[in-house]
Amino acid sequence: RHYLDRIARLDPVLNSFITVMAEQALADAARADQLLRSGDAGPLTGIPIAHKDIFCTQGFKTSCGSRMLDNFIAPYDATVVERLAAAGAVVLGKTNMDEFAMGSSNETSWYGPVKNPWDTSRVPGGSSGGSAAAVAARLCAAATGTDTGGSIRQPAAFCGITGIKPTYGRCSRWGMIAFASSLDQAGVMARSAADAACILDEMAGFDPRDSTCADVPVPDYVDALDDDLHGLHIGLPKEYFGSGLDPAIGDRVMEAVREYERLGAVIREISLPNSPSAVPAYYVIAPAECSSNLARFDGVRYGHRCTDPIDLEDLYTRSRAEGFGDEVKRRIMIGTYVLSAGYYDAYYLKAQRVRQLIAADFKHAFAEVDVIMGPSTPTTAFALGAKRDDPVAMYLNDIYTIPANLAGLPAISIPIEPLAGLPVGLQIIGDHFQEARLLNVAHRYQ
Ligand code: GLN
């Protein structure tokens, strides 16, 4: 009731929820109360969370922030949803997001932008901006998010919360609407690394329904939280502190790094020489995969259908023209272009090669250091509307987050000292399946 009251009071301004599931939440909370009294509680019994509206929730609207799916009631639960429910979590609702997770400001949502709770004239980041704003404004205890190029870490940084993108394949993608399948990963947005650890423990693990889900044992993330950091080797990539970075953010990040030094860590400069090519490579690969994934929205099987089509061609064309917003259309056009005969080698194949080079950079780095630290974003949260008409400026927001996605690595953003009243995020990147280490390093700062 506490959280539902806050949602009713504050969300008319923040717009962080697309659907509030009040009735079900209260029924689940009453059941949780029984379980707690009878001593049968699970690890998350009664914990009120929210799901990004990209995760299918049986019997409830799953819109993915798009008019295309405004009428879509999911017939089944995503694995992540199912697992958190089995652990006892109570779902308060579904959070707002950029349309099909394409965006960095939450302004591409069909349901209107989300406002940053620290300053409602600013964006919360995206695409998981609804989850980030809801956690920051204490409208839920934690929320799920997805990160294809930074969509957990960037909004976490802008809203002053903790957000972890696990290793690619750590959490199942089954029932999570696909954007770019080789990059998409589910993760947690929470108030602290300790909270994120509790939730990730329940979300992660093998799922035979997702062929890219890794069959790797899940360690106890909570157990490792307090591990000592003496002798931890931290690498600072020089490319992450270059000209695009707001110098004041660079200073904040260095203050945080010195804090780790006091905790016994050893700092050294490293180089990820190919990281400047990450954004261009991503904006070939992600649209290519999205153009293929979004072909399923044809107005026939589910989703928006135009009225009175004159023939099949007209049905496809008008349903898609009406159902998708501008950014999604831009991505589909870029994607079909880079995959078309004659351009495939020049763009798509080349981007895949760049991706290999970026992965190799990290491999070299992790031969020398345990974790990599840098800023999560080049600036603090920007004003609503400031970059809406400039896609390239918008894309450059993800300059520090995208490399980890291309390499499939886990990464976390944690809040450090704010700047002029606005949150700042420290990004910590780890080697594959080192989530326990990341959560431990994050926890020790807080
Ligand atoms: N902002 C990036 C994009 O628009 C990343 C989105 C994401 O991680 N889902 O593609």
Image (cartoon, rainbow, N blue to C red):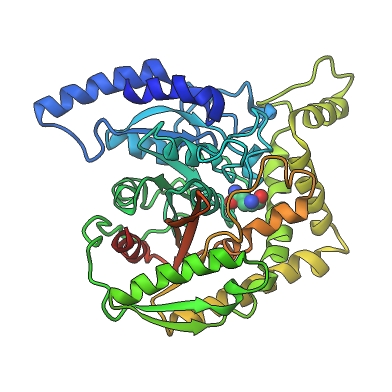
The picture places residue 20, in percent across and down from the top left corner, at 47, 22
Nearer to me, 116 or 370? 116
| Residue reaching furthest to the left | 38
Nearer to me, 86 or 112? 112
Q: Which residue is rendered at x = 42% and y = 47% of the image?
A: 188
Q: Is residue 12 visible?
A: yes
| Residue reaching furthest to the front | 420
Quadrant assignment for the N terminus: top left
Res. 407 image quadrant: bottom right
Quadrant assignment for the C terminus: bottom left
Q: Which residue is rendered at x = 46% and y = 35% of the image?
A: 134
In this rendering, is residue 36 above or below 9? below
Query: Is 379 displayed left or right of 305 in the figure?
Result: left
Q: Which residue is rendered at x = 30% and y = 50% of the image?
A: 201
Query: Is 431 displayed left or right of 232 in the figure?
Result: right
The picture places residue 279, in percent across and down from the top left corner, at 68, 63
Query: Is 116 displayed left or right of 294 in the figure?
Result: left
Q: Which residue is rendered at x = 38% and y = 74% of the image?
A: 258
Nearer to me, 369 or 295? 369
Res. 235 image quadrant: bottom left
The picture places residue 108, in percent across and down from the top left corner, at 69, 38
The picture places residue 71, in percent across and down from the top left corner, at 62, 21
Q: Is residue 431 visible?
A: no
In this rendering, is residue 401 above or below 94? below
For the image, the number of numbered tags is: 0
